[in-house]
Image (cartoon, grey):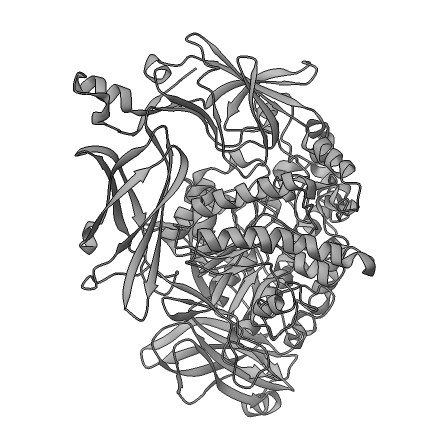
Amino acid sequence: MTRCVDLLVCVILCLFGGGLSFKEELSLSLSLSLSLDGKWSLSNSNGSLSLPAEVPGCVHTALQQQGFIQDPYFRFNDLSYRWIAFENWTYTTTFTVPKELRSKQKLQLVFEGVDTVASVSLNGVIVGRTDNMFRRYDFPVREQLTDGDNALRVSLLSPVVYASERREAHSAYRVPPECPPDVQKGECHVNFIRKEQSSFSWDWGPSFPTMGLWKEVRLEAFDILQLIQVSSVPLYNSSLSQWRLQVELLVDVVQTINGQITLSLPELDSEETFNTQFVPGRTKNSFTVFISKSSDVKLWWPNGHGDRPFYRLNVRGFQDGFLILNTETKVYFRTVELVQEPIVGSPGLSFYFRINGKPIFLKGSNWIPAHSFQDRVTPAVLRNLLQSAVDANMNALRVWGGGVYEQDLFYSICDEMGLMVWQDFMFACAMYPTEDDFIQTVREEVVQQVQRLKSHPSVIIWSGNNENEAALATDWFSIPAAQRPLYLKDYVTLYVNNIREIVQEEDQSRPFLVSSPTNGAESEQEGWVASDPYDLHYGDTHFYSYTLDCWDWTTFPRTRLASEYGFQSWPSFSTLEPVSVKEDWSYSSNFSSHRQHHGDGNQEMLLQAEIHFDLPNSTDPLKRFTDTLYITQVMQAQCVKAQTEFYRRSRSEIIEGKGHTMGALYWQLNDIWQAPSWSSLEFGGKWKMLHYFAQSFFSSVLPVGFEDDDTLLIYAVSDLSEDLKLRAVVSVYSWSDLDPVCTLKSDPLLVPGGSAVVLYKQPVAALLGGCGRCTRLTCLLTFHLEDSSGQRGPTNHHFLSSPKDAQGLQRPNITAKVQEDETGYSVTLHSTSVAAFVWLDVGNIPGRFSSNGFLMVTRNRTVSFTAWRSTSVTELSGSLSITSLRDVY
């Protein structure tokens, strides 16, 4: 077994006396770390299974790696492998401790993450227990260690059985929901265990209640002082026009140390030294550095609004002139405010974020766990998914409260890329118990997570839970009226008296919301649970409707901020093929039904598509299946486009007291497995049509067109800081002809930075009458924005009728030529007619196109392809398929 010894902190103290040599002093005072990651042994409760297992890792991946099970995602294996979560499992390893570590005053066994309920024994002695996947655990083990082999054993209880037993022990009253809906094929009582809530199943994911050592395991040894965490939070005093930096050192100390701490930001010419005393035990030590007013502090900005420079904070500790502590960390300067204040012409309050004093429209999506087995979420997977968010012009992601607090790298990449993070605490769609032990482990969880994440500028808000205020207010769980005060009391106990209290004590630099959706300040006034948490005059909104016509913007809520909304689609065939067999390749197959975890979801997709499109009718079963996958993606893309554009154009308007919408976070960005869901990125990272659409509808300058009472309006939406002078350019095309029938231009108008302005308004009948040769059924519109230097933003489209009613739409017979040049690959298309929703697919070759799912109103168009692995013109040409709307019926 490979072991490594790392130097964490150098502590050289003169209190060891003058008789020691420099080397002896160094040896006595080092803080050393012995990694226990790598190969362990894993066995089940009766010993019938015994196998090697990687740490970090989990039981399922170990079983798969050793050939005991197939891919858990293959076909119906989520049901076949239910037994795994009902077993108890034990991880064991042996290790020897180098003399340098054994001689230290304090030795601690550190588990960064145990999933979930376990007892830990060392050389036959139980040294600790765990009950929370989201906590780090430190167990003192100096007395249990021996000079020879040390046997470490982690005995994990079945999370399903444990949750059920906790539920049984909670006999005073029920804590709903008892179980997930049958369609989710999940396990019960997940709210009784502090574990990834979606691991017991969700409406977009499988039930794989994991067990394992999902993060690092190590032995830490020190004589005097161990630095556990450095956090730094910049705060700005606007009245003094001065920054200050709050720095916290979380340390574990063996004996009292008197010394000095020097904090310096050399690039900002700021340095301060503090006399301090570290007392024995684990303590948090706070210091404040005032940044020189003469320094030009460069600010961190979200994607699309500026750069993201950082500064280096040097932390040094001294004892009688000797260096005892030396570390460096990044510091980003930015301010964040959640603005809830009266709005002229509207009851209620605003709800928007100001970053560095600038109102920012949140453009983005919701993040769920990227895999059922967290050890499979590699740095490459994270970077690919987050880069795809940035490439689609997103500036925000909501880390949803039913998953996990993401790994450090996730937040570091968000810092780097300018993705603001709305961070939920891990509570979702349920009531929760409030026994003392449950509250206590939650308190420790919250303290640790806030301390870990508060240095990240990307995190702009803490939110206590997902949808639990709404669940209580609108009675999701049929709670009798007489019992309602009991549940309200539990809700306030958990989220207000504990989580909120901790967050406000630990972090004064960013806002806290108790729930999402919520009425925010108004919910607080109503005792933390509003009578209607969906009131559009306050807070954020979650909104889903699968039966109303998604092209009809009047069905969407004119909310202050839309933090969840969306429609399902199926992933592409290349994503489904590896986890299915031929008999599964039908929309009505058992596999298609099994993969759908949202009640009536498969039917809802077709009903929504059928409103505006002809459904696929090929007599070839496989083509009919792949065409149906395509039409669900067309429907989803067009639906989310319509809704997002409505939110973006509503940023400057108040209509009937509603509006000033300042955020659109659709549900959801990524997938946890290969299945139908609301995602815009398939499992594996492939872009759905929706994600290509997002690249346009989240553009910093965007034309939005829609009809109101048979009148066409075109808005210019701008997220820029500077003002623009823009005109709308409208082109009218016949479905049967690639040459425009006519082109119309509006007068130029001033579009202030950060606003939405009407540029064009005309009755459709008058527009078509002035154009000639056109009716609603024979023609369609494209439009874009221009200033004196040319086109600004993407070209958009508006259908004057449902495409299924379009007259003159022909099969376009698109041909393609793939070429390679110095920048990569390009695909040049030639079409004989107007083609809607042109979709390029290169099967299982990973990568993305510069544009896809587009309306083709020109004879030729070239798009580029960025490959995520090496490929060739021959491979791409052989894999390329092209589908347009008229090709599927």
Q: Position of residue 569 (x, y in %)?
A: 65, 55
Residue 222 visible: yes
Is 227 situated left or right of 685 in this image? Answer: left
Q: How many numbered marks have been drawn onto this rendered protein structure?
A: 0
In this view, the residue farthest toward the top is: 148
Q: Quadrant of the C terminus?
A: bottom right
Name the quadrant containing residue 9: top left
Q: Quadrant of the N terminus?
A: top left
Q: Is residue 804 above or below residue 26?
A: below
Q: Position of residue 669 (x, y in %)?
A: 55, 53
Between 299 and 108, the residue placed more toward the observer is 108
Between 425 and 126, the residue placed more toward the observer is 126
Is 820 situated left or right of 763 in this image? Answer: left
Residue at horizontal 58 percent and vertical 88 percent from the top:
768
Between 401 and 829, the residue placed more toward the observer is 401
Q: Position of residue 519 (x, y in %)?
A: 61, 68
Residue 868 visible: no
Residue at horizontal 64 percent and vertical 27 percent from the top:
70
Name the quadrant containing residue 837: bottom right
Q: Is residue 178 above or below residue 546?
A: above
Is 250 situated left or right of 708 in this image? Answer: left
Residue at horizontal 18 percent and vertical 33 percent from the top:
320
Between 840 and 226, the residue placed more toward the observer is 226
Q: Position of residue 717 (x, y in %)?
A: 46, 76
